Image: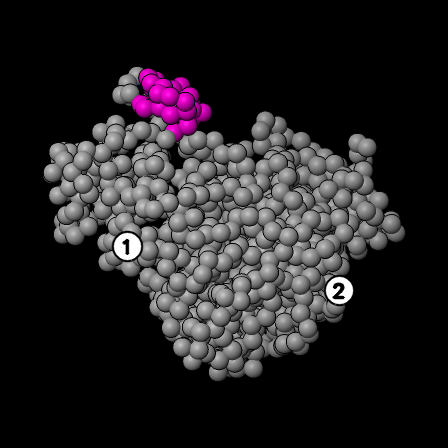
Amino acid sequence: MSDQIPQAYVSKIDRRTALTWIGVVGAATAVGAGVVVYGPKTGGQPSTRGYGTDPKLAKPEPAPWSRIMVPAQLQTAAILADFILPASGAAPSASALGVPDFIDEWVSAPYPDQLRDRPIIMNGLNALVLKAGAAERAAALAALPGSGDPATHAFWKKFRRLTIGAYYTTEAGFKDIGYIGNVARASDPGPSDEVKAAVEQQLQKLGL
Amino acid sequence: MAVAEPYDVIIVGSGAGGGMSAYHLTKSGLKVLMLEAGRHYDPAAETPMFNTNAEAPLRGVGTPDKPFGFYDATVDGGWQVPDEPYTVAEGSEPFIWWRPRMLGGRTNHWGRIALRFGPLDFKPKTRDGLGYDWPIAYEDVAPWYDKTEKLIGVSGAAAARNLLNTPDSPPGCLMESAPPRAFEIFYARAFKAMGIPVIPMHGAVVTGQMEGRNTCVFATPCGRGCAIGANFQSTTVLLPPAMATGNLKIITNALVYGVDLDKAGKAKGVSYVDRRTGEHHSVRAKSVVLAAGSGETARILLNSKSSLFPNGLCNTHGMVGRYLMDSVGTGVTGRFPAMEGLPPTNDDGQGTQHTYIPWWGYEQQKALGFARGYHIEIGGGRHMPSMGMAGLLRDDDTSVGDDLRATLRHRFGSTIGFDGRGEMIPNDDCYCEIDPTAKDKWGIPVLRFHWKWGEHETNQAAHAVKTFLEVIDRLGGKPEGHVETDGRKAISKGGEMIHEIGTARMGHNDADSVVNQYGQSWAVKNLFVMDGATMVSSPDKNPTLSILALAWRSADNLATLARQGAL
């Protein structure tokens, strides 16, 4: 991590989502085409509604619940997500894929698993926000993975888990990890000779 | 085109049993009214084919609203259905009940595993003295299996193997499966070393050319449903041709709660509540078919009380709700260094597993400490990434950046999950009845379940776990997480395999059963049951194909009786 002050994280929520949000949480400021940065969430009743037992599946609508993270927390989430998965070669950084927004969607969700994660993530982000000076931040990030403090350790594990899941479920993530499916095919020819040979070699090593 | 009263037949339910009954009865020229408790469902428009997890809320993970994940086809349901509770008796082992509320029922999301019951499965008591024999034999059902496989489209064709109690389908019934994937080639070698055969899975997926059907595109999971109808769903394969006859009318959101009798004690129709409006309706027909799913079918019968049947319809001998069964479920996942670092390959496959392991221990049963057996369903490969991707990392892994990327890339696709699906012997502790106090939103009394696994089942579960650990070890792998070797803890919850069957079983007379071999009730000759409720035993083979074949056989008998004026 360099000492250079990172670019401010710009939320990757699309305009359709943003318009839904405006109705729910009030003030939001549009910046450029299809990208918005959110102002303080004042006024309006935050929604804690789930998507229900019959959501539209073919064209999913954005999650209906209000987001709880404030800009400072989103910025911290971006720094941390990019510490875990910075850009590398052709692979974009976690923040470029909107991972902080996803973390916000996750910790804001009204379901039991996510409600359990909420204090772990939010307390962790708040602690890091306090150490937002460049030098302190770099030191704090470097110390995170090896932290012996149980709360910090739990935050790190959880945040990293969410970041990895959010990252690799995107098309860019597919490319990076080597998932080449989800394409219509006329037939399934099975694995290539190269793959079969590699498996065969392993089986022989195992005496099978 | 509009079908109007008087109907010849009312069918309650639109899943495997109801759909197949409607298919045959409408083609036989009978006028049919189908009542479905859930909403209309259009797979062509609603199926999330090719959607990525990133497009779904929470990256598609399961929530209480969508327990099997956002994209699972199930509508308005899961382990709980809003406004429609059920209870589990105090002191009972856990029981859970999966219900959807949609046209086509559970055929929309099922696993498409389509295995025939075998000859021993119909005569289990004759074989080992336990449980009960069916009033029919494999030979009685075999022609209907043939017809069903040809109609719904089943893959898994192979040269006849003549394995015990694992029927080969005759030539022409099945299509060829896609070749085994890398992980399937890999695991097969361990089973081979143990002397256990690995054979093509029978899956209700069109993998070849089939008249009037689209071929599988070998991508996107079947559990989401299929917009192109390449796998079997009642909504894509049975209901459209039934509608095309002009003899079928479907009413959705119609929650049936009672069969109505005339003065002579014959069924004159059913009563239902419209789930949207709360209005009650009664509809009339010359015959009634219950195919609401084993639990709901039993509930309708038990709630249909009259002076003739004060304890519920067809329940004079207390047989309704008895002999509730499920499959024995077990599972262990392994991670395999030998499968790491393989070149990228497309493992999406044909939806079902391409190969599986049928039960192999028939000859050793006495030494094993349990009667009956299990087959093994095995999943693995490089599936579309999900929120669980960090599970590929060791617990103490703290890497970030390029190290993290490299580890994930290296391990992607190197885990394999082994699942046992086994036979349960019916016992007196597993049944459902009407809860004395609990009611649903519309005031209809709900089911109360009682459950207790027997020792044959828990011993079987322990054996399955031991087998999986041996296979994982032979393949140089390590099991993931905590592995429960005590069968009583390793076994699934009652109902969890979503194979609940047997609440209105068939038999030889009204003292030992609710219906005859054609699903015709002993007590009311124009009332039929055509879902899994009629099953006498719960073989390891997943029940849907047998529900379809038996419903076709029963519907054919009903059509003959109707023609003869015998109803």
Residue B85 x/y as whole percent: 48, 41
In this rendering, is residue B175 above or below A183? below
Q: Which residue is mark 1?
A: B403
Is residue B347 visible to us here?
yes
Residue visible at 52% across and 37% down? A57
In this rendering, is residue A9 above or below B178? above
Pointer 1 and pointer 2 on the same chain:
yes
Say whether residue A23 is magenta. yes
Residue visible at 35% across and 41% down? A92
Is residue B318 visible to us here?
no
In this rendering, is residue B133 above or below A143? below
Q: Which residue is mark 2?
A: B172
Residue A136 x/y as whole percent: 11, 38
Say whether residue B394 is magenta. no
Please state the chain letter of the residue tagged with numbered disc 1 in the rendered image: B
**Residue B265, quarter of the rendered image:** top right
Side of A125 where B29 appears, left or right: right
Q: Nearer the viewer, residue A72 or B120?
A: A72
Q: Nearer the viewer, residue B519 or B77?
A: B77
Residue visible at 66% across and 46% down? B229
Q: Which residues are magenta?
A: A13-38
The amino acid type of the residue labelled 1 equals Asp
